[in-house]
């Protein structure tokens, strides 16, 4: 086989060059590479990349338009590991919608908003590292595009390709409009592989287990609070009972003392009653003697 070298060192009669699918893949890869280059370096980078390619691919590379700053920032985040979490959340949101799980949708909605904000901050940081400061309007476009990638499977596939030229918005991903927003092939719904049934069942089982775990945690928390309240009431009741027992003991001692005093008083009364009786008897005897003495004088 004749192997006449091209400017990029590839054999010009390489069978891969006659494969349209291979050409498309090469162009997609070249576009993704260029669209992650800082905007100020885009045109020189495109010129160099076209100069290194064979004529057919070079002509297509020269058609790649410079991305908006917001689209470029989204392309940066599409290569970041944190973006995979957004795609996982997108699948979970669709599952919750399919299941009509309102509680799960509400929970995932809060997580989506937090993740969109975090990814937008990450894109801002990546842009700053490349020497580009995102204006507030550009940051808003980044947030809307990331949100679209989470709530729409097609938008998610497009953002994941890293070939945005213009940003996206949720609900506005129309096939006729995508050619102006994406360089190269346009990922479609058919290219977003549905999750395997076993994997889907496993994720749903994990979601059910997570829901049960949260419910168990809430029940345990409620039980701990109820136990604390019961212990506090029990301690208060014990303290009051102890005070009452102490008071009862004091009263028992007082009662015993009073009863002893009463018995002593009763004994004194009995003794005095006897003395009164004796005095009365003595008085009567004396009065009889006086009377008898008076009768004798007469």
Image (cartoon, grey):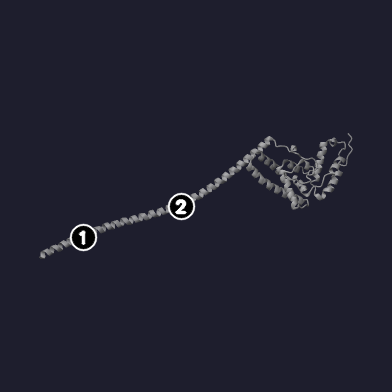
Please provide percent x and percent y for residue 108.
Answer: 66, 44
Nearer the observer, 283 or 179: 179
Q: Is residue 236 above or below residue 173?
A: below
User: What residue is shown with label 1?
Assistant: 280
Please provide percent x and percent y for residue 52.
Answer: 86, 43
**Rendered residue at 67%/42% (across/down):** 93
Q: Is residue 294 above or below residue 14?
A: below
Q: Quadrant of the C terminus?
A: bottom left
* Measured Cα–Cα span from mark 1 to mark 2: 58 Å
Whether residue 251 is visible:
yes
Q: Which residue in the rendered view is the most extreme toward the top?
A: 1
**Rendered residue at 82%/41% (across/down):** 27
Q: Quadrant of residue 180?
A: top right
User: What residue is shown with label 2?
Assistant: 240
Tag 2, which secondary structure? helix
Q: Which residue in the rendered view is the most extreme toward the left?
A: 298
Please provide percent x and percent y for residue 22.
Answer: 82, 37
Q: Is residue 297 left or right of residue 95?
A: left
């Amino acid at each position: 086989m004749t192997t006449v070298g091209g400017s990029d060192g590839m054999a010009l009669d390489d069978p891969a060059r006659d494969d349209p699918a291979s050409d498309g893949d090469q162009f997609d890869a070249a576009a993704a590479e260029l669209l992650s280059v800082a905007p100020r370096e885009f045109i020189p980078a495109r010129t160099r990349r076209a100069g290194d390619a064979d004529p057919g691919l070079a002509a297509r590379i020269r058609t790649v338009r410079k991305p908006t700053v917001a689209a470029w920032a989204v392309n940066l985040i599409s290569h970041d590991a944190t973006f995979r979490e957004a795609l996982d959340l997108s699948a979970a949101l669709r599952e919750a919608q399919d299941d009509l799980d309102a509680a799960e949708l509400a929970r995932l909605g809060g997580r989506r908003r937090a993740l969109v904000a975090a990814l937008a901050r990450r894109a801002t940081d990546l842009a700053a590292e490349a020497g580009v400061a995102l204006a507030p309007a550009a940051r808003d476009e980044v947030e809307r595009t990331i949100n679209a990638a989470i709530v729409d499977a097609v938008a998610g596939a497009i953002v994941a390709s890293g070939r945005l030229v213009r940003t996206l918005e949720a609900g506005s991903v129309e096939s006729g409009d995508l050619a102006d927003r994406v360089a190269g092939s346009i990922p479609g719904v058919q290219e977003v592989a549905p999750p395997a049934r076993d994997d889907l069942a496993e994720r749903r089982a994990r979601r059910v287990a997570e829901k049960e775990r949260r419910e168990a945690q809430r029940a345990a928390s409620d039980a701990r609070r109820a136990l604390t309240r019961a212990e506090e009431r029990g301690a208060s009741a014990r303290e009051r009972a102890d005070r009452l027992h102490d008071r009862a003991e004091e009263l028992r001692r007082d009662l015993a003392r009073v009863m002893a005093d009463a018995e002593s008083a009763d004994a004194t009364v009995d003794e005095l009653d006897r003395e009164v009786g004796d005095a009365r008897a003595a008085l009567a005897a004396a009065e009889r003697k006086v009377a008898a003495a008076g009768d004798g004088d007469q």
